[in-house]
Image (cartoon, rainbow, N blue to C red):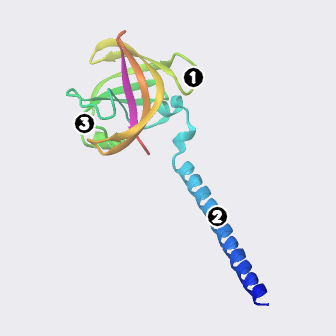
Amino acid sequence: MKKRRSLAAILAVVANFALILAGCSNSSNKSSNNQSNKASMQNETQNKSAKQLLTSNDNLWYMNGSINYKSKSGIDAYKFNSKNHTVTIYSVNKMYKTYSEAKQANDLDKQGTLKYTFKNDSANKPVIYMKGKLSDIPMHQTISVKNAVRGKNHQSHLTVTGYKVVRNLDDDPAPQVWVTPKE
């Protein structure tokens, strides 16, 4: 009789333990599903192609040799206007979280405005052709988007996201990164 009670007690403990573990598992799955849903809702840019991100973003896109490249002449900052297919290029001293922040800091040295077109139909690896005048000098450049990149700019303490690109400026190709502050 004692054996049966001991066995029944052990089985009851094991059964309760199994129920507790099953409940924890369901709770964990619901929590992780909620977290992934929140993340996808907060970062809508993941659902956009490179072509859409570059031209629909109202922020500056910074082009430099690397995310933390130190330039003595400043950083090229691109601001797209998708309505009239133009891009205004500025020289700035550092990366800013928003265009209005750079404007407020009076750190937008306008170099010129170029017309842009896409030379291919690729949504994620577009080739952008720009033509116009920079500092009253006629120029053209082609920017070929390659792979996605992200990191932290140490000077501005901003997390940035964007693309590795090859900028062909007046027939002189150079690898660059083209990034914007992460939303």
Specify the quadrant of the image occupied by residue 72.
top left
Dot 2 or dot 3: first in sequence order is: 2
Q: Which residues are magenta?
A: 174-180
In screen coordinates, is 44 left or right of 100?
A: right
Q: From the viewer's perspective, is the residue at label 2 or at label 3 nearer?
A: 2
Query: How far is the residue under mark 1 from the one under mark 3?
Result: 34 Å
Q: Residues within 10 Å of mark 3 (few under 14, many from 20)?
A: some
- In this rendering, is residue 24 above or below 154? below
Residue corresponding to mark 1: 122
- In this rendering, is residue 82 above or below 174? below
Residue corresponding to mark 2: 25
Rendered-image quadrant of the N terminus: bottom right
Query: How far is the residue under mark 1 from the one under mark 2?
Result: 43 Å
Dot 1 or dot 3: first in sequence order is: 3
Q: Residues within 10 Å of mark 2 (few under 14, many from 20)?
A: few
Q: Secondary structure at mark 3?
A: loop
Residue corresponding to mark 3: 107
Query: Which x, y percent locates residue 53?
Result: 50, 34
Dot 1 or dot 2: first in sequence order is: 2
